[in-house]
């Protein structure tokens, strides 16, 4: 069997208790029981090809959603800017990306419209090409998430006990 490489990099997790009864500073927020988001209104299916940039492709939707919310216009955001930028890679030069590094990096560099940087190549070329495009940093500041939060959602029924952790970018 051939060893496959995937774009999403998983970090080993430490054993922690997320029981809100013992976590100092645990915050409780109210979320709706149900909501609907029709993403077909403003985004298209993307083809990342054989590049391990799935995290960059998935995160670009955040910028597209926020741009649509602000302007009402559909505009594809660059995945190459995210995949090649060191702020989203934190020195990692291998295939794929770490989700938390990417999301935190996007709070620094923001999103760039794809028509300004339409690049979809694998590392190390992605990193080398992006190094020469410091002009994109100012553009990204126009559509930059203000913060990243981590949501932990627990499911508990008779058949399943599960934990799902997700990173969320917030625009203010």
Image (cartoon, rainbow, N blue to C red):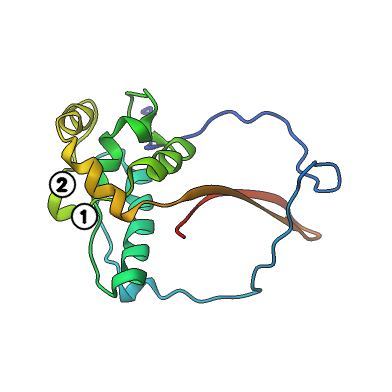
Q: Position of residue 82 (x, y in %)?
A: 30, 41
- Which mark, residue 117? 2
| Label 2 residue SS | loop
Mark 1 is surrounded, within 10 Å at the Cα level, by few (under 14), some (14 to 19) or many (20 or more) other residues, namely many
Residue 21 seen from this side: yes
In which image quadrant can residue 134 be found?
top left
Residue labelled with disc 1 = 113
**16 with respect to 10 (left or right):** right
Q: Nearer the viewer, residue 5 or 41?
A: 41
Cα separation between marks 2 and 1: 7 Å
> Could you tell me how many numbered marks the image carries?
2
In which image quadrant can residue 143 be found?
bottom left
Q: Are marks 2 and 1 in contact (CB under 8 Å)?
A: yes
Q: Is residue 68 above or below residue 55?
A: below
Residue shown at the point (37%, 31%) measured from the top left: 89
| Label 1 residue SS | loop
Residue shown at the point (29%, 72%) measured from the top left: 71
Residue 96 seen from this side: no
């Amino acid at each position: 069997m051939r060893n496959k490489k995937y774009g999403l990099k998983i970090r080993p997790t430490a054993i922690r208790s997320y029981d809100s009864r013992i976590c100092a500073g645990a915050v409780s927020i109210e979320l709706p029981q149900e909501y609907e988001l029709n993403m077909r209104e403003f985004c298209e299916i993307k083809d990342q090809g054989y590049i391990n940039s799935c995290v960059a492709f998935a995160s670009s939707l955040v910028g597209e959603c926020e741009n649509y919310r602000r302007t009402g216009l559909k505009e594809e955001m660059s995945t190459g800017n995210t995949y090649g930028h060191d702020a989203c890679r934190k020195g990692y030069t291998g295939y794929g990306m770490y989700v938390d590094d990417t999301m935190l990096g996007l709070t620094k560099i923001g999103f760039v419209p794809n028509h300004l940087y339409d690049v979809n190549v694998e590392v190390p070329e992605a990193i080398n090409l992006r190094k020469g495009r410091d002009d994109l940093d100012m553009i990204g500041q126009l559509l930059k998430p203000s913060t990243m939060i981590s949501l932990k959602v627990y499911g508990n029924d008779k058949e399943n006990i599960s934990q799902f952790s997700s990173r969320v970018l917030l625009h203010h």
